[in-house]
Image: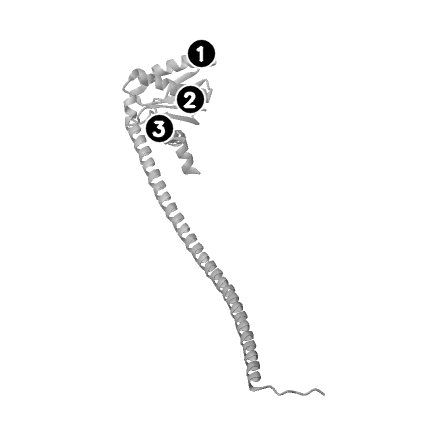
């Protein structure tokens, strides 16, 4: 039977120191593990918060950017529309002035008798070709009757040479054009039912409507007209 030797005080003290050192070491290692895990969790939570804040900032920035972009578009559109309206208004004023000046110059056309006679012949021929009748009437200013008769002779000859047909043209002296008319003629056919108004006033009015696109293209250019209509 073995004997159990009692430990001396020194031995007991040494053992206690060993146990204390072992427990201390375990505690330090455990504390280090806890610290590492806490740092990892902190890093994860920090990254999560940063992502959330970044997303929030991005969303707010995107919203503000969209608002600023929309505001800029509205401003640009408003300025563009105002500019367009001013330009269109200026163009219309120019066209109105152009036609007003043309209207004021209409009476001067009749001063050159030779030129006026040729113009009247063209206006009469236009009516003859449109009606294709062998008898028509003309209405003109009473002051133009002499020159209109010369134009009638010229128109009849040319009509005959172009179509091979004769046409009788009479001046309706019972119902002349108004004295304040700028000139031209009115061609009556169809037994009085058809009236081709070839007076200078009417031809200018037609220019203001039918020929307006061509006039705009000539004055302002086709590309700019297309730009404003698109």
Residue 161 is marked as: 1
Q: Is residue 204 above or below residue 1?
A: above
Instruction: Pick the quarter of the image with the C terminus.
Output: top left
Quarter of the image for residue 116 reads top left
**Closer to us: 14 or 115:** 14
How far apart marks 3 and 2 lie (CA) works out to 17 Å
Q: Secondary structure at mark 3?
A: helix
Q: Secondary structure at mark 2?
A: helix
The image position of residue 84, as x and y in percent, is: 36, 40
Q: Residues within 10 Å of mark 3 (few under 14, many from 20)?
A: some
**Closer to us: 20 or 86:** 20
Front: mark 3 or 1: 3
Q: Secondary structure at mark 1?
A: helix
For label 2, the residue is 127
Front: mark 3 or 2: 3
The image position of residue 97, as x and y in percent, is: 30, 33
Q: Earlier in the sequence, mark 2 or mark 1?
A: 2
How far apart marks 2 and 1 lie (CA) works out to 16 Å
For label 3, the residue is 204
Q: Is residue 215 above or below residue 40?
A: above
Q: Is residue 24 above or below residue 48?
A: below
């Amino acid at each position: 039977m073995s004997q159990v030797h009692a430990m001396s005080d020194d031995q007991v003290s040494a053992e206690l120191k060993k146990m204390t050192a072992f427990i201390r070491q375990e505690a330090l290692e455990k504390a280090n593990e806890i610290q590492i895990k806490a740092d990892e969790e902190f890093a994860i939570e920090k990254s999560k918060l940063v992502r959330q804040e970044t997303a929030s900032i991005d969303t707010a920035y995107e919203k503000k950017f969209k608002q600023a972009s929309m505001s800029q578009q509205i401003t640009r559109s408003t300025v563009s529309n105002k500019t367009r309206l001013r330009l269109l208004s200026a163009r219309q004023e120019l066209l109105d002035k152009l036609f007003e000046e043309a209207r004021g110059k209409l009476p001067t056309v009749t001063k050159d008798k030779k030129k006026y006679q040729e113009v009247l012949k063209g206006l009469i021929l236009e009516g003859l070709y449109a009606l294709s009748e062998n008898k028509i009437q003309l209405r003109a200013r009473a002051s133009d009757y002499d020159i209109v008769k010369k134009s009638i002779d010229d128109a009849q000859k040319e009509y005959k040479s172009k179509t091979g047909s004769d046409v009788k043209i009479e001046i309706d002296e019972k119902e002349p054009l108004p004295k304040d008319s700028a000139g031209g003629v009115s061609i009556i056919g169809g037994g009085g039912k058809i009236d081709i108004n070839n007076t200078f006033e009417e031809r200018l009015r037609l220019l203001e409507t039918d020929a307006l696109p061509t006039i705009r293209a000539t004055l302002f250019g086709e590309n700019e007209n297309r730009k404003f209509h698109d």
